[in-house]
Amino acid sequence: MQFGYCERIDGSFWAEPLNAVTNAAFLAAALAGFWLWRRQGGRDAITLVLIGMVFAIGIGSFLFHTIPQRWTLLADVVPIQLFAFGYFAFALRRFLGASGWMTTSATLAFLGLALGLSAVGRMVLPAGIAGSAGYAAFLLGLIGVALAMSRAPALRDQSRLLALAAGAFAVSLTMRSVDGALCGSLPLGTHWLWHLLNASVLYLLLRAAVTGERRAITAASSPGR
């Protein structure tokens, strides 16, 4: 696995056709989220920013899997990180009603967890799997927030969406992790499944954010608030 992924065997533009074209799933998730946002009234700028981040994830990942260079690696990784930590803060604030101070503190702690898991992964895991260690924090974050939301009856639908996202992400992370190990039997690898499953995860998260927007607006405008 000289080029990092089973599918890539040289440095040409279309050396990873499946890894490249499956990024269209991120664009589809963003467009579906935008359509839902418009149907819900299209009034919340924060959810629109989240939708834009998903679109940027698709563009950045496509660039990296066609032009694997340092700047395209940043174009791939930065939108993912911004969405992950941004959505965590969003969920704490919007769904769980955390204060600004609590949201900031918890998000910084979440960042520390991701960095810590990534560092430990590089020290103790094989090279092909070590890159997935930091993403384990995102899985833990999804599970934790979904469980916290499940305690509030008004958030039942959003909690279920996050729980579904956590389950899909667990499978997705597995596909990312076994890509290198399965090169001998699966020359195309499994990284493209990481893309397809993650697009589903991101759509579920966008759906939770957008459908939760109306409740937040309704609650804010109700008498006595």
Image (cartoon, helix red, strand yellow):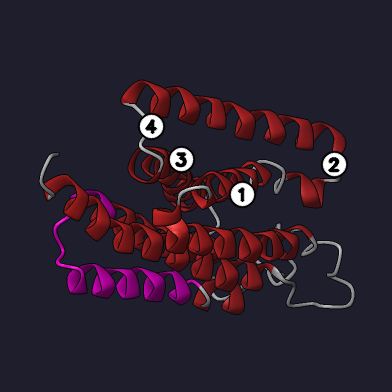
Task: Give the residues in magenta.
Answer: 23-47
Q: Nearer the viewer, mark 1 or mark 2?
A: 1
Q: Nearer the viewer, mark 4 or mark 3?
A: 4
Helix or strand or loop: what does disc 1 sit on?
helix
Q: Which residue is mark 2?
A: 125
Indicate the amino acid at tag 3.
Phe
Q: Which residue is mark 3?
A: 85
Where the N terminus falls, by quadrant?
bottom right
Q: Position of residue 26 (x, y in %)?
A: 44, 69
Q: Is residue 20 magenta?
A: no
Query: Can you name the residue that lies furthest to the front here?
Result: 224
- In the figure, residue 58 lies in which quadrant? bottom left
Q: Residue at x 73, y 77 (%)?
A: 188
| Left or right of residue 7: residue 53 | left
Name the N-terminal-most of marks 3 and 1. 3
Helix or strand or loop: what does disc 4 sit on?
loop
Q: Give the alpha-carbon distance from disc 3 to disc 1, as whole Å.
A: 14 Å
Q: Give the alpha-carbon distance from disc 4 to disc 2, as whole Å.
A: 35 Å
